[in-house]
Image (tube, rainbow, N blue to C red):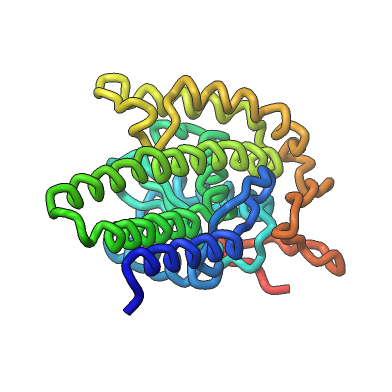
Amino acid sequence: MLPRSKTALLSLGLGLTLLVAACASAPYTGRRQLLFSSEGSETRMGYQAFDQIKRQYKLSQDPEANALMAKVGRRVADAAQRPDYRWEFLVFEGKEANAFCLPGGKVGIFTGILKYTQDESGMATVISHEVAHALARHAGERLSQSMLAQAGGLGLGMALGGMGSAASTAIMQGYSLGTQLGILLPYSRTQESEADHVGLILMAKAGYDPAQALEFWQRMMTKDKKGVKMPEFMSTHPNDASRLKELEEFLPEARKYYTPAHAAHAAPSPPPPGPRAATRPSSAPPTPAAPVAGRWIPAPR
């Protein structure tokens, strides 16, 4: 067996090798990412999780909410330019003002958020933000960050093997708190900001005025006014003031992609920069998709 110090160095070296080998770039922003998992494995986990959610939560029977979800979802999915995703858009019954997009294009909103979306632009803001998380592979990135933090903890634990239990426990607790506050939470806030950024672009490409997103976020920010808010450095999301400021800074770029809805399909928006961009084949015009019971199922060509 290797000495603990050599084992720790070996673990660190392996971790650095993985770090270099697993770098990727987020679409539109170009931010460097740490990704150990494959997109295929993330998609499979997303589909499994969506099946569980559909068993756990009741689907909404509100025809207007389902129709709007399908309409907006179809347009945002077209803007996302990922025909390999098995897009699905569902409305779930639930008091929480929440929404999600799992890897592979499985999108859900809870009826509790409808009082904040209020209209089509509000719905587009929510769906675009959640789809941006999926396009940027934020779920895979969080998984990779957790794996790296665990590996670092394992290496530190091996290196501390000869110390007294009280000292070792204190150091490991400090490491855990440090990685949470210094790495994982800041990454989470970065991802939320990036989803706001990319979400505005997707919204604009889908034919919605991205400036309308600010009105939705201002409405959302009123829901927690009575509660005690955590300091930003302890939160998974940017604080309200930071979020609004960044949204205003992102608007000029998003407007470059904006084509009003009535002309959105007449003049295609530019694809996202970088190697991860996916484009629709130019050999045939796009076939309209048909919403079926809240799902977006592409019509056969």
The residue positioned 43% from the left and 50% from the top of the image is: 100
Query: Is residue 287 shown left or right of residue 134?
Result: right
Q: Is residue 104 among the parts visible in the rendering?
A: no
Where in the figure is residue 146, as x and y percent of width and height?
A: 39, 56
The residue positioned 23% from the left and 61% from the top of the image is: 161
Where in the figure is residue 101, as x and y percent of width and height?
A: 48, 54
How many numbered circles are shown? 0
Q: Is residue 146 above or below residue 31?
A: below
Where in the figure is residue 43, as x and y percent of width and height?
A: 50, 68
The residue positioned 39% from the left and 41% from the top of the image is: 185
Q: Is residue 242 above or below residue 193?
A: above
Asked which quadrant contains residue 211, the reply is top right
Q: Is residue 175 among the parts visible in the rendering?
A: yes
Q: Is residue 54 above or below residue 184?
A: below
The residue positioned 18% from the left and 50% from the top of the image is: 169
User: 265 or 62: which is nearer to us?
Assistant: 265
Of the 4 image quadrants, the one containing the C terminus is bottom right
Asked which quadrant contains residue 128, the reply is top right
Asked which quadrant contains residue 152, the reply is bottom left
Of the 4 image quadrants, the one containing the N terminus is bottom left
The residue at the far bottom in this view is: 1
User: 278 or 192: which is nearer to us?
Assistant: 192
Where in the figure is residue 155, as x and y percent of width and height?
A: 35, 61
Q: Is residue 122 above or below residue 174?
A: above
Query: Is residue 267 shown left or right of residue 82?
Result: right
User: 127 or 297: which is nearer to us?
Assistant: 127
